[in-house]
Structure formats: C-alpha cells, structure tokens
C-alpha cells in the first residue's frame, strides 16, 4: 500500500488483517505531489525485488486555491498527473520484468473522472500550467483528469509498439462519497448528505477499478476508458493522439526525464 499518511495506512492495514488474517500487506510512504517522494518510493520498491503485476494510479486532489507543489508546479496537475506519470515510468522496468518472468499480463490503471470533460478550449494549455491568474479549482481538476486519460492512451500505444505484455487503461469510478471534497466545506456537507441515497459507496466506487485490474474479459484490452465496469466513450480531447504525445513530452520535461 503506497500511502501519503503512514498512520492512516497502518490503520487500514490492521482493518484488512482483521478481515483477512493471512493477507500480506506492506505499507510504504508515497506523496504523489513530491517528485522526491516518488523517486524514493520507486527506488525502494525496485530494490526490494518484489514483483509488480498491477499498478493502480489512484491519488486525487482538489485544491480550492492556487498552490504550487514542492517542485513549483500547480498542485492538482502535479499530484493528479505528474506524480502518476513519473511513478509509472520509474516502475515500468519492474513491471516488464514481472510480465516476462511470470508470463502474465501486467495492467496499469489510471483513475480519471468524467470531470475530464470540464476543461478550457484545447483541453490543456501547455504554456499556462502555472497560470495563477486564470486558476479555477474545477477546471484545474478537469485538466488533471484529462491528463490521466491521455497518459494511459499514449502509454498503451508505446507498450503495444514495444510488444510488451502490459496494458494501460483509464476509468471513471463514479461519483463517490469520499472526503476528496473536504477542501470545500459547503459542497462536502451536501455530498455527505446525498451520499447515502445518490452517490456510490466506496466499495461500489472501487468496482470498476477492480474489474479493469482483475477481470479476464479485460485481458489484452488497452488504451480504453471504462465506466461502471464497461467500456465508455471519453471526450474527443481525451482521444486526441497528438495531444497525448504533446502531454507526454511536456511531462518528461517537467519530471526531468528527457
């Protein structure tokens, strides 16, 4: 379990072990908003000798006011996209090795959102990633979720071209009653009230992630967008191959991998 808050992670581990005493769980610290943290986690994991079949990029943040990450990048874009991009690249050789040695397909899943449709103009203004004057909490979130899909699609293309038995897909988990909206108290209160009758529970929200990660019917499927455990149609911007390549190049530059 890769977690930002180690105390919370340990509590979850204890809860899981109560239900499944034979489970083997390691809790490791990972803050997706910090490239230093991502690099340390990936290094520790790669050096551990553990195999890696599944990678679910699930971190998400909604930031009410404009903030920069430790690496001086707008915080939502840094956490929701760049952290996942760097993490995936740093763990990819371990995934390839596992797929070869175990002769079993690896799967990478980016948790996006239907909010990827709520973006300005061309979707991602590459020269305005850190534009404080035009910052909007919701549009910044939508941009980062669009980036999740574009990242998965371009990664899927590259893996297929390389002939590697690893798939990459993205998904919308649904509107879920979690604490992601805690930064906006009024909306969080409304969401909490609606949770029991309208929003999905956490267990229901995890269903599509589990389906794409584990179900035999998804074997060999790559570069797709899922919703409610079925293939879905993403926006035209999300399926723009040139936009995906441009984002890939920018992400390499911002994470110091070019």
Image (tube, rainbow, N blue to C red):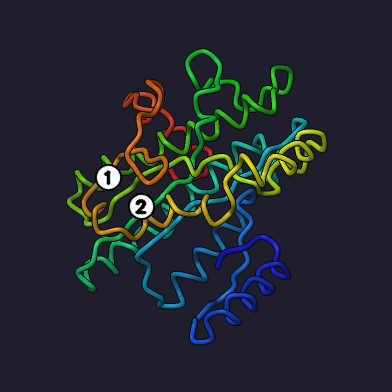
Q: In which quarter of the image is residue 94?
A: bottom left
Q: Is mark 1 on a helix, strand or loop?
A: loop
Badge 2: residue crowd in 10 Å (few <14, some 14–19, many ≥20): many
Q: How crowded is mark 1: few (under 14 residues within 10 Å), some or many (20 or more)?
A: many
Residue 216's place in the image compared with 253, above or below, is below
| Residue 222 tag number | 1
**Which residue extends farthest bottom?**
22
In percent of width and height, residue 120 lies at 56, 16
- Residue annotated with mark 2: 212
Q: Position of residue 14 (x, y in %)?
A: 64, 78
In the current view of this chain or complex, which residue is farthest to the top?
A: 121
Residue 144: give x, y in percent of width and height. Answer: 55, 34
Q: Give the position of the C terminus as an image quadrant.
A: top left
Secondary structure state at the residue bearing disc 2 = helix
Q: Nearer the viewer, residue 243 or 149?
A: 149
Q: Which of the two discs, 2 and 1, labels the residue nearer the N terminus?
A: 2
Asked if residue 168 is positioned above or below residue 42 in the image, the reply reads above
């Amino acid at each position: 379990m890769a977690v930002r808050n180690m105390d919370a992670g340990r509590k979850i581990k204890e809860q899981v072990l109560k239900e499944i005493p034979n489970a083997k769980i390691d809790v490791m610290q990972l803050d997706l908003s910090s490239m230093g943290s991502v690099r340390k986690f990936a290094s520790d994991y790669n050096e551990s000798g553990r195999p890696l079949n599944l990678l679910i990029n699930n971190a998400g943040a909604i930031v009410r006011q404009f903030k920069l990450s430790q690496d001086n990048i707008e915080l939502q874009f840094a956490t929701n996209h760049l952290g996942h991009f760097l993490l995936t690249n740093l763990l990819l050789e371990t995934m390839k090795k596992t797929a070869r040695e175990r002769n079993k397909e690896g799967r990478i899943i980016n948790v996006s959102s239907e909010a990827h449709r709520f973006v300005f103009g061309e979707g991602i203004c590459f020269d305005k990633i850190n534009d404080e004057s035009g910052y909007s909490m919701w549009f910044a979130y939508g941009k980062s979720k669009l980036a999740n899909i574009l990242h998965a699609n371009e990664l899927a293309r590259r893996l297929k071209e390389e002939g590697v038995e690893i798939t990459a897909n993205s998904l919308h988990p649904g509107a879920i009653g979690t604490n992601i909206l805690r930064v906006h108290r009024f909306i969080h209160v409304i969401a909490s009230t609606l949770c029991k009758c309208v929003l999905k529970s956490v267990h229901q929200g995890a269903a599509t992630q589990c389906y794409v990660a584990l179900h035999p019917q998804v074997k060999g499927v790559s570069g797709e967008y899922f919703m409610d455990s079925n293939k879905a149609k993403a926006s035209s911007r999300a399926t723009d191959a040139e936009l995906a390549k441009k984002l890939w190049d920018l992400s390499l530059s911002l994470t110091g991998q070019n």
